[in-house]
Image: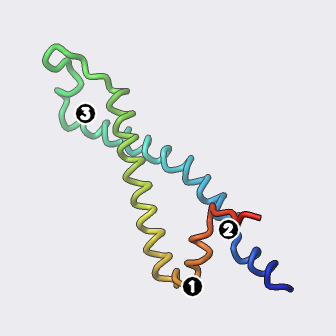
Amino acid sequence: MNSRSRESQLSKLHPIWTAVGCGLLVLIPAISWGLADRLLALALEEFPELARNYGGAEINILVIKISSTVILTVLLFLLFGLIGSLLYWLFGGSKNAEIASRIGWRRRR
């Protein structure tokens, strides 16, 4: 095996990580929607006056649920990013630093 083919083989990202990333892009917002639904149900159970017209303006439950879903989605992506970075660092990330820095980078010919 020549050095060029070995280098190109080592610099490729394993396809399983693409599938994991795609799965998380679908799974994390779904988890966030479920968490937002549960948190809103708990809040309405603890504070029933939130369900009524408050100050003449009707509180739209769907808007609250969507906005809390967006916030929870961002927080979960940050949490998974921190956990992934920590695991990468703990399991010898410096050995693979060159490969990680080449992702998305193309060499000119």
Query: Which numbered disc, 2 or 1, marks the residue that appears first in the sequence?
Result: 2
> Which residue is disc 1 drawn over?
95
What residue do we see at 65% from left, 59% from top?
18
Query: Which numbered disc, 3 or 2, marks the residue that appears first in the sequence?
Result: 2
Query: Which numbered disc, 1 or 3, marks the residue that appears first in the sequence?
Result: 3
Q: Is residue 99 left or right of residue 90?
A: right
Is 23 situated above or below 33?
below
> Which residue is disc 3 drawn over?
44
Q: Position of residue 50 (x, y in %)?
A: 20, 28
Q: Is residue 6 left or right of residue 20?
A: right
> Which mark identifies residue 13?
2
> Which mark identifies residue 73?
none
Q: Label 2 crowding class (10 Å Cα cut-off): few <14, some 14-19, many 20+?
A: some
What residue do we see at 31% from left, 42% from top?
39
What residue do we see at 13% from left, 18% from top?
55
Amino acid marked by disc 2 = Leu
